[in-house]
Image: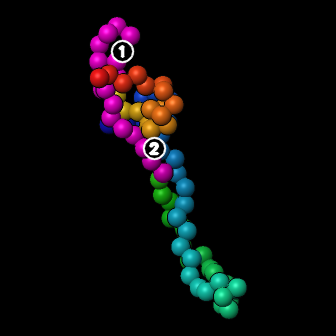
Amino acid sequence: MAKTCDICGKGPSSGCSIARRGLAKKKGGVGKNITGVTLRRFLPNLQSVKVKLDNGGIKRIRACTSCIKSGFVKKAN
């Protein structure tokens, strides 16, 4: 199952996790040094929601919370 929003298509984005070592200069140290950079993923906050369709049916989709909050999703009761 893909980790993308069915409404807006928002999916995972990538970034870096930076590991630092040392004491900051303002605390009396030599300064912080970067000792490692690893890739990481930022996943969207997806929720499984029951949605009312135009033809009167009900379907379960995965939508991000920003789409649910902004009213793009019509929830089924």
Q: Residue furthest front?
A: 77
Q: Quadrant of residue 28?
A: bottom right
Residue type, numbered disc 2:
Pro
Q: Nearer the viewer, residue 10 or 66?
A: 66
Q: Secondary structure at mark 1?
A: loop
Q: Is residue 7 left or right of residue 37?
A: left
Q: Nearer the viewer, residue 19 or 25?
A: 25
Q: Quadrant of the C terminus?
A: top left
Q: Quadrant of residue 21?
A: bottom right
The residue tagged 2 is: 44
Question: In this picture, is 35 found above or below 46?
Answer: below
Disc with the residue nearer the chain's start (1 vs 2) = 2
Q: Which residues are magenta?
A: 42-60
Residue type, numbered disc 1:
Leu
Residue 50 seen in this snapshot:
yes
Residue 1, position as x, y percentages in the image? 32, 37
The residue tagged 1 is: 53
Q: Give the residue drawn at x 47%, y 53%.
A: 41
Q: Give the residue drawn at x 52%, y 47%.
A: 13
Residue 71, position as x, y percentages in the image? 48, 27
